[in-house]
Amino acid sequence: MSEHILSIIWLTPLIGMFAVMCLPKENKRLIRYVANGFAVLGMLVTIPLIRGFETANADFQFVERIDWIPTIGAQYYLGVDGFGYIMILLTVVIGWLSIWCGWESIQKRVKEYYAFFLFLQAGMLGVFMVLDVFLFYVFWEIMLVPMYFIIGIWGGERRLYAAIKFFLYTLTGSVLMLLSLLTVYFKHIEQFGAASFALEDLMRVAAFSSADLQFWLFWGFFIALAIKVPMFPFHTWLPDAHTEAPTAGSVILAGILLKMGLYGLVRFAMPLFPAGATAEFTVQAIVVLSIVGIVYGALVSLMQKDWKRLVAYSSVSHLGFCTLGLIALNPNGIAGGMLQGVNHGLSTSLLFLAVGIVYDRRHTRAIADYGGLANRMPVYTVLFAVAMFASAGMPGLNGFIGEFTILRGAFEVNIWWAACAALGIVLGAAYLLWLFQRVMLGPITNPRNEDIKDMNLREILVMAPLVAGCFWIGLYPKPCFEILKAPTAKLVERLDPGYFSRNGLENPLDKYAQSKVATLVKE
Amino acid sequence: MFFLDSIWLIPMFPLLGAAVMLLFGRRLEPQHDQGPPADDHGGHGGGHGRPAGRTLVNILCPGMVLLSFLFALGAIFQLQSVEGHSYEVVKWTWLAGLDSATGMGLNAFTADWGFLLDALSAVMILVVTGIGFLIHVYSVGYMAHDGGYYRFFGFLNLFLFFMLVLVLANNYVLLFVGWEGVGFCSWGLIGFYFRKQSAQRAATKAFLVNRIGDAAFVLGMLLTFTTLGTLTFTEIGPALEAGGFQIENPWGPLSLLTLFFFIGACGKSAQIPLHVWLPDAMEGPTPVSALIHAATMVTAGVYLVARSSEIYVLAPNTMLIVAVIGALTAIFAATIGLVQYDIKKVLAYSTVSQLGYMFLACGVGAFWVGIFHLYTHAFFKALLFLGSGSVIHAVGGEQDMRKMGALKDKIPLTYKTMLIGAVAIAGVPGLAGFFSKDEILWKTFSAHQYELYALGLITAMMTAFYMFRLIFMTFHGDNRVDPRTHVHESPRSMTVPLAILAAGSILAGYVGTPIVFGPVHDMLPSLEHWLSSAVVVADAGEHHAAILEWGLMLLSVSLALLAIWFAMKTFKTDRYAGEPMHGILGKRCHQLFLRKYSVDEIYDRFVVKIGAQETGSQLGQIDRKVIDGAVNGVGKLTRRTSSLTIFGDKWIVDGLVNTIGYGVKFFSYPIRMFQTGMVQNYVLLFVIGLGVVAGYFLFE
């Protein structure tokens, strides 16, 4: 059982999809119960993973490896380390909440909706656990399909434009990624005489390829990821997709899909092409794009008239922080960047859920249509304020931990990086507080909001786990850092061998190896 | 050491109160909170009466603060027997694990939920909990008629939690938690009357201006860690020693990091150029102005500088900047205070000005004097604010002093206590303000900063003048109050705190009597001595003749008295006609002060409008036109190309395909004849076929 736990985790929502497809279309209630049941089940099946996961171990755990297409060397090869583990946990929780949050608002084509969502869930979980590059590409691409339909069918007015833009943008990046992957794959055949798509096999190619080649391959891969993240200037699909997607779609997009870009960087792009990732041009370009993204996203966000679009642009700003952390290429930066990815998943999902709640009631996203909501919706106001301050990096909530750790990482490399990024701290508060002032405070400006209802129990319960997560990471982030520490150390050593010993730091990997030896000796 | 080991409880009591209020408070209000009335009426708001649920609030919230105060007293009592007057309690590790390489080779990054009680935080917690308690009691009376009662007390208690975390934190990161937390509560309380547009704006503005300082604070922390390898206060001193840091001249990392912290302090303590939020913050209820925007939160910047005094003394360049900004802010705010009509605005600018004094003291190396002034100022400024609240309460929500006058017999207790406050801040000998302010002036003078001394002296004069302008315009002269208003003295819950604070304003200064007082100085407790274990107390340097100190004291006192006399002469008239300040300052100067040097307008135009909003719109256009333009252009181009290929498809490829299709169709005609779709035909065909097959086998 537990040796196939990863398969069980990603197959559970897939089985759920088939189950939903077998149900009669008219019985919406039953469909909702079954879909939500599978979402909850999807969380429960991670319990053996949580119990068995060794945080100090940087190697892949729960590995499953079967030949899939032997002629080309493609394998069904799964395994997780800290990076994947934390993302899987985030995915099952956010996935569950996003399925739950559409309980009332989704009334048309209910069956298809939940089928697509469960399919999407399976695809996302797959991405975070595959170690075979071919299979990774399959999962990466296949996820686009349900997302395309979710935006295109259940979206807002300009949903078709948004869906096509999302699809084509991502697909364009994927082509470049495929080229990089195939080059590495053939290089591997040439070098070792065997066909394999396994990550660790392809990682060995780096030693035999020139820095120049690695540079180009990294960039091919990176552009695909930069589109997914999204980084400035590849971000313009995001405001459209976010704005037009149904609430649950926006939550999944912000909460998980964007994190795939970050995950792809630390799992594939950086380890596969270390010389490309550490090239001076790469680092400088990514830093500049990140900082521009932070400031640009915040400034554009400030002036949005559409509430959801404002939150969407704030993602550009936040993800700029994440990529800045990753490209600092030191433990603080990388761990901070990944943690900030999780934090953004929590706080931005909250913000999107919040927009969804008033959208369900009033069917408008224009900021000008609201004003004075605090008069009628006190609970909503409080929860929105928590999300807002978490997002703005208030200490005691999660955003601060991520930003601070990233800034520490950036600061170690270059004080100016941190100084420029710190501008984001100021602007981040600006657009959110101004939004809050316009929609929540003051007298009720729009008479149609006079009898707007406060949140119901289900809506509160959907938001509660995320709020708890924000406080938990804000007050006690240690468990998260414990999870990220080992894979971060491994990645840093891969990119910059001898980083720890050169800086007089203790390498967590050595420590684990020693403890392992000690237990063996004892036995 | 029961109390010392439980210092972490001191902030927890108000947190408990806040949690109860903010989570369950709504149930204590009989009618659900529909938001408070739109204006700060003080006494004449909604008129909900006093529901029973409020009694619980009235006991719980001030009670929690009282508990903190008692625990603080107990802890400080026990602290006296601890060697070095310093005691640390670490509850749990907050941020740790990811180490960084630093210049010091020390690299274990930790920031704990750890609390440090030493001489400096002892003074701070006494001020915060003591004055905090009095203001809570006062608020029971002041807010009695307002809606959102639980929300008010919830935020007020939460504020005290964060403020106590700020002053008890044993490291910069936890201090920053408190620092941001008090900013958050300040935001919530400035915007308490959230239906009022001016209140929302003031709240947002306060938070955002503070954020600029906060960003610098974060950079300061990062630089501190990379330079010294620690962010824990007790390890800073040893790290400086181990690193062999010398006085930095010109600039070095220590100067830079102290400057970053000072920018942070400028935000929180409303110093130039980040002073603009504090006067607007007066939109909050008056007890909030007293507690947060006068006595405690705004002094956090001074606390931060004093807390980092070990680093500051090694950075003379930053020290000079601190002193200059302090002195400039002091005089700048005082000039604006001279001409304000809103009673709370006068006090707000006075607060900015007094905070400038505190930074001046820190800047010339007299950190303990800065803290001394912080401590005396907390008494008389809280008193003045609460007194003004009592006045506003009495005249039915009016804040304009031109519509007051001759109130002294109608609200005698308020008058007397406010008079004491005014005398104290004006620097009349014997009261608290005299001792601390004169010490600042003397330290500035003896540090050879004569220009700054002159600025301080002029500011002192102005302070005495505008404060008595306030007293005379409000309480003396002719009665300009709206005749429909029923002027009444405030309830006990408001006047008793006033009386206690008045007593404090008289007595608080006696812990810092000047050395030239000789036997009196020796007899009384010395704050300087007490603080010497926590902040750097520079030796007097060259000794000036006592006669010089006496002479300067005489000078400042006589100038203050002169200013009071002048204010009396100008404003204690029977008829308030015209604007006497016009004549005194000249029209242009008066306009300049009245318009607050147009700083708000300049910021609004260049930073908010052009810097943020315009740029944001333009960038949004770039997104739509340039990037999306390119994307859509590629899309269009693809469509064009594909329509070309469609042409090819239709006539060439499809032509071929269709030809084949037609061919098949033509030749299949005979076969199709059989496929009629009629069962009989099929059966017939089937039977015929069967016959043929059977025949074949038969004749084989």
Image (spheres, coloured by chain):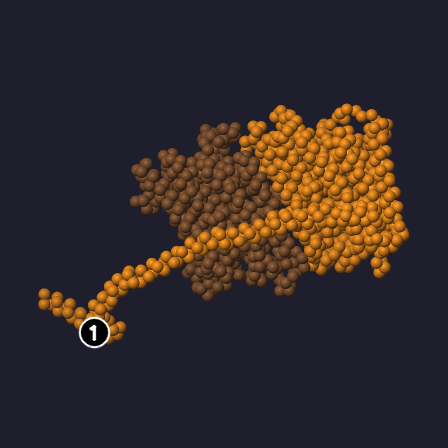
Tag 1 subunit: B
Report the number of discs. 1
Q: Is residue A361 visible?
A: yes
The residue pinned by badge 1 equals: B684
- The residue sitting at 62% across, 39% down in the picture is B216
Quadrant (top left/top right/bottom left/bottom right) for the C terminus of chain A: top left
Q: Is residue A281 left or right of residue B519?
A: left
Which of B186 and B336 lies nearest the eye of the viewer?
B336
Which of B228 and B204 lies nearest the eye of the viewer?
B204
Question: What shade does chain A have?
Answer: brown
- The residue sitting at 18% across, 70% down in the picture is B689
Which of A157 and B185 lies nearest the eye of the viewer?
A157
Mark 1 surroundings: few (<14), some (14-19) or many (≥20) residues within 10 A: few
The orange chain is B
- The residue sitting at 50% across, 58% down in the picture is A244
Name the image quarter holding residue B546: top right
Q: Amino acid at mark 1?
A: Leu
- The residue sitting at 79% across, 51% down in the picture is B341
> Is B511 placed above or below B200 here?
above
> Is B231 placed above or below A159 here?
above
Helix, strand or loop at label 1? It is helix
Image location (x, y in percent) of residue B31: 71, 60
Q: Is residue B506 visible?
A: no
> Is B423 placed above or below B691 here?
above
Image location (x, y in percent) of residue A316: 52, 48
Image location (x, y in percent) of residue B124: 73, 38
Which of A420 and A313 lies nearest the eye of the viewer?
A420
Q: Is residue B695 left or right of residue A98?
A: left
Image location (x, y in percent) of residue B400: 80, 53
